[in-house]
Image (tube, coloured by chain):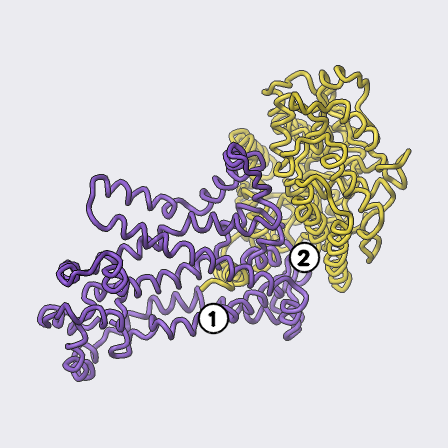
Chain colours: A yellow, B purple
């Protein structure tokens, strides 16, 4: 019987990990200049499904350069999904062995930090990775709870922006993409023509991430940071307003394809790529390869998303810095690693200006290296670079995973209403309250630890 | 099986008239015995003493259980005990690193699981969905097995096609159905063409029935397979005898054939229920997480608690509670169908 499967799985992983020895290479700290002769550094990174051949090439390229610098080899391991990554991290955290260096998505960094299984960098450590000032300051926003306690070293930025169809906007007499959410809804109405199957906005309500990002952005722009110390503020009117605006595109403004209740982000990209939408919401520069091969090739441009909350005239608080969540990848060094200096040398290599630009060219992700970011000249990427500077970190707490899930759950449970054309206000309030309760409980646990 | 039973098989005459009654009383097991139901009526008295003194029984090679037993110990018993231990810890992302020394909180996790989590709702969903799917698949599977019992042109092809849902990996089944169930997808347009607006399949209250439907589609061939194996064990003579007695098709099915199926189908029911209740892939791929409230079945809830919220202690408690909740009816059921006491003489062949 497998009812206890999850629990047992975790336990099996533990047992298996304990049983396995001789992982991750031995050797003591060398101190001073990094000499890694005969050593092997183990690095865990996410597999890049779009560019798998290029990624393999990048691995061998970096491996060769690293060998030339330090004399050590690198062993790259990949994980296919976020779940895969979680499992690896959990196993390693429990057993105290595994890869030396991990790549983490930014929103997962607080959770990883909470496990205390990764190195919080000292000033000395920062020097070993090339100095803190080599990084885009905004990118450091989600490296740790404060400037003195940072574990995540920024590797790439992937800020969220919107794409717009230049032809459709021009045809509707719109000169400039919207800068407030209200203006966006106005423009979207002009762009919508159900007879031709054209809609103002393309976004997926069934996506696993997008919905909470909208709610976060609109709330922050209205002056509500969601997490205020030990208090969760989902019961603030700004959150309800955000949901109403986000749902309203579909139910009141009718500027979104009704099928979008079942869409994920990739469906929205497809609709935009077919030339059927004015705006594609919540996308990144990694949509470039898809769009370049589509019907809208050469006819689209990126813009930062609005920073003025619905119903407001101007951004409140630091709302104008919340065009996107601070998004991208951080690298962290495992606390159990016996070759931390070697790990830092590797990070110094991959965050150098040349390597960052090279990486941008191959994979499209923006550099976290400040100099490299400044040297980008492609006009198409300009708004994306802007958004990288206007990205704001999501609250740095181990409870963020739960809060994010609770925010997303409000949308998931509202989809039936959405599909019927109107979201009942009391139902929505109940769901938000439920999210508040769950999120606050999680925040309380975080405060206790 | 002892060597005796095979001797019985060879020597004992089988009175056809006695078949229906005895076949009902003793349940054919999955291996070999299914081919000889009913013979133990007359054979029982002779075998009993032989069973106690038989050489083969005394020299049973019990040591052969060691490899399997060790694996059971390492893969099931030890992790189960660890799981129970975990359920008494406040184990989450803050304490994971030194999990053995995580704060011991006794039954707090259990209290939270039972009072402040959707656990009981999930148990109810899991059991009801499994039962509904099972009750629908039983007649489907039996009907299909009966229909393909007698040879006809193309029977092999039909039988192969029937097995397709069973052979397909769960992940593939769920992905294909999810695609078909998209708003304005294949199913919606098909229903729309006959004027039915079915509403949402992958969100909202209807998701429960979506899950039941897909589960039925995926699992009826399992019932079909076991029913077929039961039918194969009906001897040719029995058909002849009942035909001679003038039994028509329904009577023949009801009083001659079905008793043979009771054993395999009881087994199918048990395995099927467990399989449904444990099915993680189907709801996970169909609906994703967070799942709509109407399909937050047990495996999904435990998964989310463990691997999205990192509450390993709480989720271990949930897993343990559900294990107990489901083990009770399971135990009663096992006693009732006597699938578990193979060693009791006469209890089961």
Residue on which the image places disc 2: A115
Q: Measured along the vertical axis of the image, is residue A251 above or below residue B324?
A: above
* Residue A385, x across and y down, in percent: 76, 28
Tell me what residue is drawn at x 65 percent, y 21 percent. A196
Cα distance in 3D space between marks 1 and 2:
35 Å
* Quadrant of the image containing the N terminus of chain B: bottom left
Which residue is painted at 86% across and 42% down in the image? Answer: A222
Residue shown at the point (52%, 44%) measured from the top left: A38
A380 relative position to A223: left or right: left
Residue B318: % across, % down? 58, 65
The chain carrying label 2 is: A
Foreground mark, 1 or 2?
A: 1
Q: Nearer the viewer, residue A45 or A280?
A: A280
- The answer to whether any part of residue A331 appears in the image is no
The one nearer the camera, B69 or A207, is A207
Between A35 and B216, which is closer to the camera in this rendering?
B216
Query: What is the secondary structure assignment of the residue under circle 2?
Result: loop
Residue beneath label 1, please? B327
């Amino acid at each position: 019987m497998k009812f206890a499967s999850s629990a047992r799985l975790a336990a099996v992983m533990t047992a298996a990990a304990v049983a396995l020895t001789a992982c991750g290479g031995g050797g003591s700290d060398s101190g001073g200049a990094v000499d890694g002769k005969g050593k092997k550094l183990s690095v865990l990174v996410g597999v890049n499904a779009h560019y798998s051949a290029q990624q393999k090439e990048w691995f061998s390229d970096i491996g060769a350069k690293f060998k030339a610098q330090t004399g050590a080899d690198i062993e790259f391991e990949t994980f296919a999904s976020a779940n895969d990554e979680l499992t690896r991290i959990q196993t390693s955290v429990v057993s105290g062995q595994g890869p030396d260096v991990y790549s983490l998505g930014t929103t997962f960094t607080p959770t990883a930090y909470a496990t205390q299984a990764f190195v919080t960098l000292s000033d000395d450590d920062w020097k070993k990775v090339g100095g803190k000032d080599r990084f885009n300051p905004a990118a450091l926003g989600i490296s740790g709870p404060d400037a003195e306690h940072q574990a995540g070293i920024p590797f790439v930025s992937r800020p969220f922006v919107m794409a717009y169809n230049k032809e459709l906007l021009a045809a509707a007499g719109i000169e400039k993409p919207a800068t407030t959410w209200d203006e966006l809804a106005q423009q979207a109405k002009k762009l919508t023509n159900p007879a031709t199957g054209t809609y103002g906005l393309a976004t997926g309500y069934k996506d696993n991430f997008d919905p909470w990002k909208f709610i976060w952005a609109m709330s922050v722009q209205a002056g509500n940071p969601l997490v205020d110390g030990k208090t969760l503020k989902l019961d603030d009117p700004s959150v309800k307003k955000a949901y109403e605006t986000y749902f309203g595109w579909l139910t009141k403004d009718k500027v979104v394809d009704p099928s979008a209740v079942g869409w994920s982000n990739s469906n929205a990209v497809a609709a935009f790529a077919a030339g059927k939408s004015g705006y594609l919401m919540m996308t990144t520069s990694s949509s470039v390869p898809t769009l370049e091969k589509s019907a809208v090739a050469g006819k689209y441009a990126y813009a930062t998303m609005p920073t003025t909350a619905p119903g407001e005239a101007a951004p409140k608080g630091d709302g104008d810095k919340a065009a996107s969540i601070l998004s991208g990848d951080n690298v962290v060094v495992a606390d159990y690693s016996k070759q931390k200096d070697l790990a830092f040398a590797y990070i110094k290599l991959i965050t150098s200006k040349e390597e960052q630009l090279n990486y941008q060219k191959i994979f499209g992700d923006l550099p976290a290296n400040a100099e490299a970011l400044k040297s980008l000249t492609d006009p198409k990427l300009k708004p994306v670079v802007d958004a990288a500077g206007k990205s704001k970190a999501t609250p740095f707490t181990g409870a963020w995973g739960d809060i994010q899930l609770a925010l997303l759950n409000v949308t998931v449970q509202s989809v039936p209403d959405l599909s019927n054309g109107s979201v009942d206000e009391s139902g929505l309030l109940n769901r938000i309250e439920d999210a508040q309760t769950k999120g606050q409980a999680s925040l309380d646990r975080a405060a206790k630890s | 099986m002892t060597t005796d039973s095979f001797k019985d098989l060879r020597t004992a005459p089988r009175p056809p008239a006695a078949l229906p009654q005895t076949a009902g009383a003793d349940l054919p097991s999955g291996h070999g015995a299914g081919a000889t139901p009913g013979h133990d009526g007359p054979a029982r008295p002779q075998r009993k003493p032989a069973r106690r003194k038989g050489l083969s029984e005394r020299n049973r090679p019990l040591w052969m259980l060691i490899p399997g037993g060790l694996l059971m110990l390492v893969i099931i018993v030890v992790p189960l005990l660890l799981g129970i231990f975990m359920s008494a810890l406040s184990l989450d992302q803050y304490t994971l690193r030194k999990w053995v020394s995580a704060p011991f909180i006794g039954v707090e996790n259990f209290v939270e699981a039972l009072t402040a989590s959707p656990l009981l709702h999930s148990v109810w969903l899991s059991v009801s969905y499994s039962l509904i799917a099972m009750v629908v698949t039983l007649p489907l599977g039996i009907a299909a097995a009966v229909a393909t019992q007698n040879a006809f042109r193309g029977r092999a092809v039909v039988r192969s096609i029937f097995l397709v849902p069973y052979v397909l990996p769960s992940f593939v089944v769920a992905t294909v159905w999810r695609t078909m169930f998209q708003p304005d997808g294949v199913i919606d347009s098909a229903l729309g063409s006959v004027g039915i607006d079915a509403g949402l399949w992958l969100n909202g209250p209807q998701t429960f029935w979506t899950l039941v439907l897909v589960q039925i589609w995926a699992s009826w061939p399992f019932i079909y397979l076991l029913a077929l194996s039961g039918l194969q064990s009906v001897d040719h003579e029995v058909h002849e005898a009942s035909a001679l007695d003038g039994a028509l098709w329904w009577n023949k099915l009801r009083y001659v054939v079905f008793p043979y199926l009771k054993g395999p189908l009881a087994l199918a029911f048990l395995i099927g229920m467990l399989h449904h209740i444990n099915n993680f892939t189907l709801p996970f791929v169909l609906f994703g997480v967070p799942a709509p409230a109407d399909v937050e079945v047990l495996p999904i809830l435990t998964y989310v608690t463990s691997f999205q919220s990192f509450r390993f202690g709480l989720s271990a408690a949930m897993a343990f509670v559900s294990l107990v909740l489901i083990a009770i009816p399971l135990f009663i059921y096992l006693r009732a169908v006597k699938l578990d006491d193979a060693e009791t003489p006469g209890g089961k062949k």
